[in-house]
């Protein structure tokens, strides 16, 4: 029988196309398994994944807690563990709550309608480059209060950063990712220097500590992570969501109903979410299921598997638009979840509403091509057609 590593290769074409059958089999037969390629224990059950994400004392996000190092450009709210993380995260969450998300959603819907107007009757187009990328860049820039960078140029930078998240599987991806992060850091520095637009960054600048250089570094790096992470997560979620409704046009039609729009968008993320997993390091000996974890060993909660766990989600392999509650891990969980989750959901609602409001109907125009990335589940291309 093939080893678990051979059965679950996150970069294999069949897994990229549909990881869920293999993950379901592993969740049943080996819910906690050692993956040689990732050099870590992988978790497939929802309860185990949530336990690891909640237990900051036992499972570290910050590598320095287990003797590792963190390059200065990577010092952000996402590398700190509570309680050290609280100061910077609270700063950004307070600034986020002060933004008018309803207005951001309205502007996003107008943007999508404008894109659809331009694409209707123009033949086959790529959902990723023509809708997902412009929408995601615009929404995150609108939230932060900065001038949106050129779509294609930023998409290339983001792609290099996203691919470098799989550096454990392919070390050649690490250096291009480092260079891309530096380019994005330079862009964020310019925003802090010259941008005067109202938005989240203006709010952060007003309340951020001025004398503490380390705090300023964390704030700037967190702004970079928020822009890159918000963009890449939303762009992936948009592609995945469009692919689902292309295969299930009745689901799109049902989300014309206002009460189903919010829960439906949430369910789209659970059903085929963008973030596939994250890594923690055991600080001390512990046990998960039937497996003993040694100090210093890595543990990867596989969100894709957890979100299809029938013990947590009845009818887990079905798209249930009115599912409630829906405590999925599509954007992570807890203090290390995506800071811009509410904005990403607003962008997805704007997308679905625009698709339903536009007079042209969206149809698939061939098979999409999945991006060869393990951490983020996304489309490289997704051909579609608008017909009136």
Image (spheres, rainbow, N blue to C red):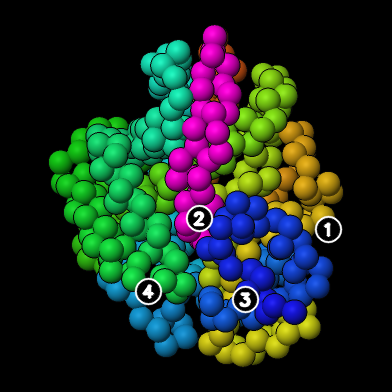
Query: Mark 1, mark 2: which one is toward the viewer?
Result: 2
**Residues in magenta, as a range:** 360-388
Q: Is residue 3 above or below residue 226?
A: below
Q: CA distance from mark 2 to mark 3?
A: 19 Å
Q: Position of residue 226 (x, y in %)?
A: 39, 50
Asked if residue 380 is among those painted magenta in the image, a careful observer would answer yes
Q: Do residues under tags 1 and 4 come within 8 Å of each other at their CB atoms? A: no
Q: Do residues under tags 4 and 3 come within 8 Å of each other at their CB atoms? A: no
Query: Mark 3, mark 1: which one is toward the viewer?
Result: 3
Query: Mark 4, mark 2: which one is toward the viewer?
Result: 4
Q: Is residue 150 above or below residue 272?
A: above
In the image, what residue occupies the spot 33% across and 57% down?
Answer: 160
In the image, which disc is placed on residue 5? Answer: 3
**What residue did someone put label 1 on?**
311
Front residue (pair 219, 286): 286
Report the side of 121 relative to 245 (left or right): left
């Amino acid at each position: 029988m093939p080893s678990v590593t051979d059965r679950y290769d996150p970069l294999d074409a069949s897994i990229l196309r549909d990881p869920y059958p293999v993950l379901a089999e592993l969740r049943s037969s080996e819910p906690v398994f050692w993956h040689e390629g990732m050099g870590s224990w992988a978790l497939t059950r929802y309860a185990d994944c949530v336990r690891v994400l909640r237990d900051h004392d036992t499972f570290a996000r910050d590598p320095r807690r287990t003797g590792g190092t963190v390059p200065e450009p990577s010092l952000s709210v996402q590398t700190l563990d509570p309680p050290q993380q609280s100061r910077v995260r609270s700063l950004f969450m307070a600034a986020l709550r002060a933004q008018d998300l309803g207005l951001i959603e309205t502007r996003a819907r107008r943007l999508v309608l404008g894109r659809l107007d331009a694409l209707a009757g123009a033949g086959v187009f790529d959902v990723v480059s023509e809708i997902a990328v412009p929408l995601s860049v615009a929404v995150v820039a609108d939230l932060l209060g900065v001038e949106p960078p050129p779509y294609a140029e930023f998409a290339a930078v983001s792609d290099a950063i996203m691919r470098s998240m799989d550096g454990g599987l392919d070390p050649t991806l690490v250096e291009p990712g480092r260079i891309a992060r530096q380019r994005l850091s330079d862009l964020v520095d310019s925003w802090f220097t010259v941008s005067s637009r109202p938005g989240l960054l203006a709010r952060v600048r007003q309340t951020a500590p001025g004398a503490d250089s380390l705090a300023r570094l964390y704030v700037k790096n967190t702004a970079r992570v928020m822009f890159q992470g918000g963009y890449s997560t939303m762009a992936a979620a948009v592609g995945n969501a469009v692919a689902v409704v292309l295969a299930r046009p009745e689901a799109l039609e049902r989300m014309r109903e206002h009460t189903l729009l919010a829960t439906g968008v949430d369910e789209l993320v659970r059903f085929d979410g963008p973030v596939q997993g994250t890594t923690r390091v055991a600080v001390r000996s512990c046990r998960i299921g039937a497996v003993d974890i040694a100090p210093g060993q890595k543990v990867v909660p596989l969100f894709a598997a957890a979100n299809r766990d029938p013990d947590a989600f009845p009818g887990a392999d079905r798209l249930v638009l009115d599912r409630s509650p829906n405590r999925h891990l599509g954007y992570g969980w807890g203090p290390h979840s995506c800071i811009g989750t509410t904005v990403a959901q607003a962008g997805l609602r704007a997308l679905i509403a625009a698709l339903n409001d536009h007079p042209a109907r969206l149809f698939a125009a061939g098979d999409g091509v999945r991006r060869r990335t393990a951490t983020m589940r996304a489309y490289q291309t997704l051909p579609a057609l608008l017909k009136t």
